[in-house]
Amino acid sequence: MASTELYDALVEVCRDRRTSREFDPDVEVPREHFDMILEAARHAPSGANTQPWHYVVVTEPEAKAAMADYFIAEASRRAKLGMKFPTPNYRGLATAPGVIVVIADFRWINAFPVLNDGSELDALYKQNAERILLQSVAASTMSAHLAAAALGYGVWWVTAIGQENAQSELKPLLGVPEDLAIIDIVVFGKPLKPPYKRWKKTMDEIRSFETYNADLFMDQKAIETWIKETRHKVMFRDESRID
């Protein structure tokens, strides 16, 4: 029987990975740790082996502060619009010792089956290609998160995808070409306070054999009820406090 030693080590990292949003500013991330994290990221799988990602390591306090200011302003804007979304305190981004901005290049859609004739079918193929590229960058980003966690850091996934304001504010700050897209920021460091373990669905809730278990299906009403009654409990709380 094959040894599960490597698997056990991997699952331990996955289980122990914790989201932290406040970091000790006096703990410096060594340059080699940035390289180790990105070494894991660059070996992620990608559609057509396009590897449509680039990473910008940010160490300048002014740039971190500017990014934090953007997300704080965005959170305020959402609040004024009445979105009622449980928003974290983005000020921790300004003092985090580890900040890596994730950039995607969606021009690689031509590496996939597309027609480029402007037809409705071509639009569907391009939509599929963009999803593949997004999944590819997400896989690479998750590898970075696990590598940071394996090095003993608390990590934070800050997303900027799909926000035109984020692109217009952050691209000039980091010199990112207009053709590229900033989609995430990997934030990590030594947590200022011990992070808690979040609630996770059980194995039986996320697994089916052979065919989808219809008993697990949530209709739209059930989803809306969960969002209204449970979401705020599981986003930023200890798993022992969700009831």
Image (cartoon, grey):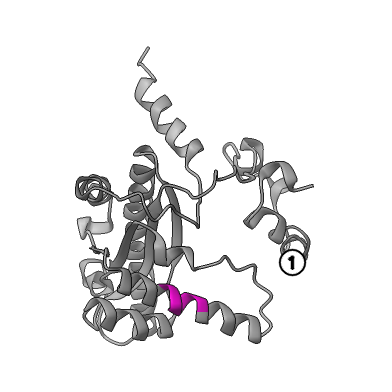
Where the N terminus falls, by quadrant? Answer: top left
Which of 164/20 is in front?
A: 20
Specify the principal SS of the magenta part. Answer: helix
Query: Per the image, is 69 magenta?
Result: yes
Q: Where's residue 186, x and y in %?
A: 37, 58
Measured along the vertical axis of the image, is residue 8 above or below residue 142?
Answer: above
Left or right of 8? Residue 43 is left
Left or right of 16? Residue 225 is right
For the residue marked with disc 1, what is the amino acid? Glu
Measured along the vertical axis of the image, is residue 86 above or below residue 33?
Answer: below
Q: Where's residue 38, x and y in %?
A: 24, 51
Query: Per the image, is 65 magenta?
Result: no
Q: Which residues are magenta?
A: 68-72
How many numbered marks, from 0 up? 1
Which residue occupies 40% across, 80% down?
Answer: 166
Residue denoted by label 1: 224
Q: Where's residue 65, x and y in %?
A: 38, 73
Residue farthest toward the front in the current orientation of the protein: 26
Which of 217/64 is in front?
A: 64
Which residue occupies 44% across, 67% down?
Answer: 159
Which of 227/56 is in front?
A: 56
The image quarter in which residue 160 lies:
bottom left
Q: Where's residue 5, x and y in %?
A: 37, 20
Which residue occupies 23% across, 44% down?
Answer: 36
Crowd class of label 1 (few under 14; some 14 to 19; many from 20; radius 10 Å): few
